[in-house]
Structures are given as structure tokens and as C-alpha cells.
Image (cartoon, grey):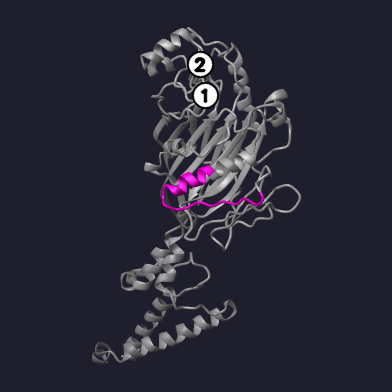
């Protein structure tokens, strides 16, 4: 009987040692399979499942409003708020508003080659902020102590939720942009703003999303490719930003004008220059929570939106174009659209997308407060003869983007009609269930220091083994065999 008892102990010891062979709590991938008794080991099963689940990614929907408007060098006025509200379609509010403007200053020699004046950009931001926030019952007061003048800056989250810092990538002290907000906060906050002569971009986000998402690497870049290829009467301003694990790039462009044969080639060349010269330098002084390299070029982003007064015209005689417009035959008219042809023939924007155009050409209207296209027969004295065209466009590139609407607004503020598009896209949010699961299951366990862990494990195994052996010897079955 002692021999049987000895065999029983020996068999149990082998099983126990195999079960706990070289256990290292710091090496989470080494998990015992548990042999035949795994179904009885509840903790082993849960821990194994927790550790086998690698990092996962969840997606969240984001509604983005993208708008473009050539305002013909006119300053914003108070009465424009009504037109702005109609353009922004606040009855169907978005999470993110990205607004691009062209000619916010007259394109004269003084404004093109002179020092940048931030006054008009500030005026537009104030009107946009007032429109977005008054609509939701939040009074708006803004004081910009130091407007953004640098080409590149990055959003940095501050302990004070009402403040933000713009960090210049150039030498010198960081540029601080401060806003005086009313108590209780505002519905939308300004994330980025950049002006180059008359081209201007303004990006606004719902305040609640600043708390919900990790938003990082907010930077801007401007490319001047107008007169002599390097003046800012034509060109682009762009904003790059990352929301959780998804990078976005917004490009506002004002391309070469003209409807003569060959002018489309000039526009194509400027698009290529903007692609080539737009970069978003990293800010080494700004710490980041992840180690992934930020995209440096436009095409390095996950979701890209390109919009503005792209100035592509119609391959059609003026009179024929006006006849199709009178018939509201947008499908037939689009057959002669320059941008559509250039995309199809590979001249520009290959692989990009644009929604169906189901609205009238947006340029050129006779004058402010007028609903008549410029030129035509009979033409008014001194009026420019221009064939109507869809100059103002919105395109996008990247997976996971759905366009919900594409329309023009009817403000008579300038000789262009504002255009906007509403998009639904998804942002990726990375999570690590392994860590969450382990912490949930074992919230109070603290592992000993690594230097003591092996001794601790051996003592635990020895003590547990002796208890189990004693329990076997004292069991009724064992005593019966004896």
C-alpha cells in the first residue's frame, strides 16, 4: 500500500510541475496549456483568453462639413451672418467645420507683395465663431491677442480646456493665440487658422470632441504659386491633423484663372506644385503619445479633402452653355467640364472623387446682389464676358469617406456662390483589451519585484504541493484503499 501511495504522490508531482513549469509572470505569452484539467482551471482559461486577444481597433463616425467661397475681396459685414448660417447648414450640424475662402482681400499689388495683414482673417473668424455658437445659444466674445503668422503650428492640449497654443516651427518664441470665452464654454472651438494673401482656411470642431478624442499634430502649410510661380495671389493653404488613429489633410486652393485654350494646363501645373511643395514638418519640441511618424506630404494622410476656387471652366461656347443652364440640364453640361475631362484623361487628380453636381454653375455672377451671370447677350457696358462655370469644387481622396450632400448656397455677397459638402467618415480608435481584461480580473494583485519573483514562486509551489499531497492522503478514497 505504501508503494501505491508513493506512486500516487509521484504522479501528482509530475502533473503539478508540468502545470507550473517555468512560470514567468513578466512573460505574458508563456501560458501553460493545462493538459486534461484545463476546463477546471477557470483563472487559467480567462487569463489565456485575455492574453490571446491582441490590440483591437474600434471605429467612430465623424461628420465633416467642407465649404469653399470666393468672396471677391469683400470684408465680412454683420448682415452676412444670415447668409453664413444658410451656407453652414446649421440645422444639420456637423462635428467638424472646415471652411476655405479665396480673395478675402483684393488681389492688388500692395496685398500680394506686402506684409501679411491678419485683420481680415480675424474678422472672418469672429463672424464664423459667432454664427456657429449663437445658433446653439452660446454668446460669443473673442479677443485674439496674437494672431497666427507662422507657416506651421501645432495644437497642444492644455489643462485649461478653454486655451490652446500655436507653436511655430521657425526660430523664436512660440506664438500664443488666446480666446476670451464666455462662462459655460462654447459649442464649437477654433482648431486651426491660416491666411496667405487672399487664401484662408478656418477649422472648427465641437468642444465635446476635444474631450472625446485624442487630437494631435495640428499643423499648417502654405504654398504660393501665383505670379512668377512664387507669389501668393494664387496657391494653397493646408491643415494637417490626426484624430485618434486617423490622419486628415484639408487643402484650400485658388488656381490660375482664365478660359483661353491652354489655361487648364496652368491649373494642372499649380496642382502638381501644391502636391510637391506641401509638407508638414514634425515639431520635435512637442512630445507625442505615440511613436508613429506623422505624414509629411498630402498623399501621406488617410483622408484628404481638396477644395476651393479651382477655376476649371467649360469646353463650350458661351451661348451653348447658357442654353443648357436655362434648361437646368446639369448632366449634359458636365460633359464639357474641364476638371472632369482632366481627371478622366489623367491630367490631374487621378483616383480622386467628387460627388454628382446637381446645381447651377457658381461663377461668374454680374455683381453683388444680382442673380444674373456676367456677360451674355445683350451685355451691359463694362461688364466682363465670362462663360458660366463650376469653378468652386470639393474633391476627396481616401477610403472610408461617404459624401452625404453636395450643394451651393444662394448668397449674393460676391460674384461666386458658396459651395459645401457634408461627409461622413470614420476615425479609428485603438484599444488594448489584454491590459483591460487583466486589470479587471486581478485588480488587487501586485507582483513582487523581479529579483524576488522566482523565490516567491518556488515557495508558493512547495507550500501548495504539500497541502495538496496532505489533502490526497486524508481523502476518504485514499483511506479506503489503505
Q: Nearer the viewer, residue 142 or 172?
A: 142
Secondary structure mostly taken by the magenta-highlighted segment of the chain: loop
- Residue 436's place in the image compared with 417, above or below, is below
Q: Does 209 sit above or below residue 410?
A: below
- How many numbered tags mark residues here? 2
Toward the right, the furthest residue is 171
Q: Residues within 10 Å of mark 2 (few under 14, many from 20)?
A: many
Q: List x then y, in percent, for residue 340.
A: 48, 20
Q: Nearer the viewer, residue 42 or 257?
A: 257
The residue at 68%/51% (across/down) is: 175
User: Which label number is shown at residue 461?
Assistant: none
Q: Quadrant of residue 404?
A: top left
Instruction: Compute the Cα span from label 1 to label 2.
Output: 9 Å
> Are the residues at dot 1 and dot 2 in contact (C-beta closer than 8 Å)?
yes
Question: For mark 2, what is the residue?
Answer: 374
Identify the residue at image location x=48%, y=57%. 185
Taking depth in this image into account, of 318 and 85 the one nearest to the observer is 85
Q: Which mark is residue 415?
A: 1
Q: Residues within 10 Å of mark 1 (few under 14, many from 20)?
A: many
Pointer 1 or 2: first along the chain: 2
Q: Is residue 351 visible?
A: no
**Circle 1 — which element?**
loop
Is residue 362 in view? Answer: yes
**What is the quadrant of the C terminus in the image?**
bottom left
Which quadrant is home to the N terminus? bottom left
Picture residue at 41% right of the left edge, 85% below the top: 465
Q: At which x and y percent is residue 389?
A: 49, 19
Q: What is the magenta range?
A: 127-146
Residue 128 falls within the magenta-colored stretch: yes
Considering the numbered disc 2 on the image, is that residue within a helix, a strand or a loop? loop
Residue 373 percent location from the top left of the image: 47, 17
Side (left or right) of 349 relative to 406: right
Amino acid at each position: 500500500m505504501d508503494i501505491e501511495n508513493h506512486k500516487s504522490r509521484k504522479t501528482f508531482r509530475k502533473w503539478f510541475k508540468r502545470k507550473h513549469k517555468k512560470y514567468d509572470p513578466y512573460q505574458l505569452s508563456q501560458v501553460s496549456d493545462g493538459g486534461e484539467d484545463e476546463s477546471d482551471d477557470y483563472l487559467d482559461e480567462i487569463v489565456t483568453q485575455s492574453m490571446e486577444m491582441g490590440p483591437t481597433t474600434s471605429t467612430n463616425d465623424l461628420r465633416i462639413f467642407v465649404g469653399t467661397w470666393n468672396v471677391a475681396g469683400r470684408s465680412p459685414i454683420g448682415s452676412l451672418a444670415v447668409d453664413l448660417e444658410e451656407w453652414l447648414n446649421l440645422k444639420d450640424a456637423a462635428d467638424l467645420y472646415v471652411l476655405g475662402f479665396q480673395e478675402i482681400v483684393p488681389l492688388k499689388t500692395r496685398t500680394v507683395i506686402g506684409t501679411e495683414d491678419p485683420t481680415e482673417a480675424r474678422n472672418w473668424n469672429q463672424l464664423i465663431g459667432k454664427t456657429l455658437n449663437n445658433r446653439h445659444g452660446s454668446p460669443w466674445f473673442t479677443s485674439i491677442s496674437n494672431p497666427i503668422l507662422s507657416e506651421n503650428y501645432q495644437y497642444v492640449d492644455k489643462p485649461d480646456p478653454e486655451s490652446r497654443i500655436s507653436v511655430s516651427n521657425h526660430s523664436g518664441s512660440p506664438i500664443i493665440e488666446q480666446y476670451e470665452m464666455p462662462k459655460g464654454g462654447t459649442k464649437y472651438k477654433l482648431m486651426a487658422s491660416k491666411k496667405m494673401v487672399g487664401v484662408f482656411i478656418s477649422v472648427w470642431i465641437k468642444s465635446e470632441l476635444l474631450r472625446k478624442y485624442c487630437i494631435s499634430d495640428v499643423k499648417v502649410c502654405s504654398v504660393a504659386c501665383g505670379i512668377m510661380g512664387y507669389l501668393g495671389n494664387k496657391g494653397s493653404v493646408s491643415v494637417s491633423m490626426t484624430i485618434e488613429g486617423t490622419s486628415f489633410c484639408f487643402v484650400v486652393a485658388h488656381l490660375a484663372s482664365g478660359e483661353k485654350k491652354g489655361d487648364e494646363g496652368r491649373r494642372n501645373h499649380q496642382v502638381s506644385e501644391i502636391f510637391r511643395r506641401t509638407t508638414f514638418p514634425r515639431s520635435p519640441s512637442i512630445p507625442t503619445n505615440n511613436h508613429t511618424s506623422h505624414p509629411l506630404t498630402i498623399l501621406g494622410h488617410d483622408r484628404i479633402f481638396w477644395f476651393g476656387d479651382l477655376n476649371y471652366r467649360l469646353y463650350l461656347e458661351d451661348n451653348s452653355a447658357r442654353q443648357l443652364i436655362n434648361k437646368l440640364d446639369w448632366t449634359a453640361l458636365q460633359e464639357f467640364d474641364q476638371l472632369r475631362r482632366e481627371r478622366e484623361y489623367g491630367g490631374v487628380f487621378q483616383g480622386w472623387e467628387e460627388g454628382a453636381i446637381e446645381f447651377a454653375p457658381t461663377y461668374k455672377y454680374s455683381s453683388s446682389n444680382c442673380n444674373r451671370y456676367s456677360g451674355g447677350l445683350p451685355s451691359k457696358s463694362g461688364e466682363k464676358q465670362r462663360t458660366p462655370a463650376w469653378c468652386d469644387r470639393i474633391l476627396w481622396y481616401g477610403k472610408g469617406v461617404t459624401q452625404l450632400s453636395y450643394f451651393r448656397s444662394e448668397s449674393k455677397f460676391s460674384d461666386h456662390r458658396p459651395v459645401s459638402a457634408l461627409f461622413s467618415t470614420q476615425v479609428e480608435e485603438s484599444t488594448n483589451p489584454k491590459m483591460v481584461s487583466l486589470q479587471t480580473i486581478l485588480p488587487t494583485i501586485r507582483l513582487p519585484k523581479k529579483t524576488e519573483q522566482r523565490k516567491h514562486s518556488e515557495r508558493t509551489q512547495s507550500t501548495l504541493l504539500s497541502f495538496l499531497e496532505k489533502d490526497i492522503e486524508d481523502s476518504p478514497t485514499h483511506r479506503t484503499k489503505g
